[in-house]
Amino acid sequence: MSAQATEKDLARARKILASTPLIDGHNDLAWAIREDSTAPMDVGAYDLRKRTKGHTDLERLKKGMIAGQFWSIYVPGEAETKNAGYAKTQLEQFDIAHRFIAMYPDRLQLALSAQDVRDAFKRGKIASLLGMEGGHVIENSLGALRSYYDLGARYLTLTHNVTLDWADAALDSARHGGLTEFGKEVVREMNRVGMLVDLSHVSPGVMSDALDVSEAPVIFSHSDARALANVPRNVPDSILKRLEKNGGVVMVTFVPGFVSQQMADYEHEFSESQKAARQRLGSGDREALHREGESWKAEHPQPQVTLSQVADHIEYMRKVAGVDHIGLGGDFDGISVVIKGLEDVSTYPSLFAELVHRGWSDDDLRKLAGENILRALNKAEEVSARLRKTRAPSTKTIIQLDGKK
């Protein structure tokens, strides 16, 4: 809890979360299993019944009162992964996620719809949804997109950190000024099949174009407010203000550099110092580069980011976007530095206790916890049911629409 919240606040928070499903928009457990240093890709060895080395295991999920989790099916978009095969890596990540969900049938349950989430909650199980992170994995193929939906994907983050042939990434060059015509067709086909359009990681131009095109609510599975931390991964006010009409949801994340401007500036200064060191030392001298980095950190103490600052982002988004358009997406097991008070998946009740202390109503806390994202998912399902009656699966290609191979 924050220093201000009381045990009474925490008790009320827990009571609310016992009656309303708490759904988190983004957890990178599947990638943590893949990259585990002792037994990479070994789902059995990464035993969630024990305390894991990361942020997530069954006991901490229970303590955190998590009722639904979008497990991220993440594949890096950089060239080295492309050479290894985006689709191959993506399918392996689906396999890892499906296997760890199946390993704990008493605790986890695969969820493919909003109703599945509510049914799992009634059974006391964690509804396990799948969300793909990075549109590079469809390899410019709408057929691949539909196949991933059939494997269980219920959202697609249009880009990760690399600009695609059809969409600009927030942290890469804006080559297209938003979505290309093929990118807009990707959004339309996602609407048709019932896959949520996730706009975390994309440029503001892509955010705006997607909102223009999408007939279903969009989401941001793990993003914060740019007005409070001016970094490219966060959402500008101009986009937040459009969510009321669209029905979308921004899921506030716990990435320290997205929460705190001071931390964002610190990370930028460290990155610049490392860039200068590489120019002096050469990129091959990794040990010397590491020593330079550690020396810089010793001279520049890292700022502390707190739970209260995350609550500030939630309250800011409530003011700008409205209380019906906010949720939570911690990004646990995808971050190396954690926020004080939000160290792992066990800590969600403390965040709700802080909001109780700030005067939030039970109804508004229920919306934040899960009702908003369930409404968006349910609406996407309704839009899909309507569109499937009038539209055949799209066979359009990037060559036809953009003139690209």
Image (cartoon, rainbow, N blue to C red):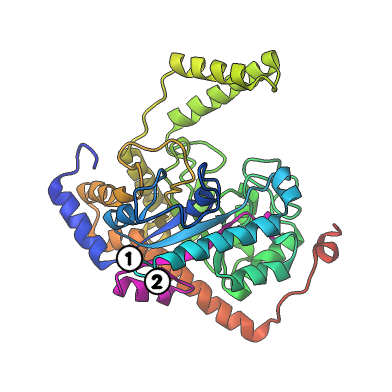
**Which badge, 1 or 2, comes first in the chain's sequence?**
1
- Which element type, helix, strand or loop, lies under badge 2? helix
Q: Residue at x 47, y 62 (%)?
A: 100
* Amino acid type indicated by mark 1: Pro
Figure check: 70 above or below 356 = below
Give the labeled residue for mark 2.
Answer: 117
- Which element type, helix, strand or loop, lies under badge 1? loop
Q: Residue at x 35, y 41 (%)?
A: 343
Decide: marks 1, 2 in contact (CB < 8 A)?
yes
Residues drawn in magenta: 109-137
The residue closer to the viewer here, 92 or 221, is 92
Give the labeled residue for mark 1.
Answer: 21
Q: Rate crowding at label 1 as few (under 14), some (14 to 19) or many (20 or more) other CA atoms within 10 Å.
A: many
In 3D space, how far apart are the residues under numbered discs 1 and 2 (Cα atoms)?
8 Å
Farthest-out residue, bottom: 389
Figure check: 368 above or below 314 = below
347 relative to 264 in the view: left or right? left
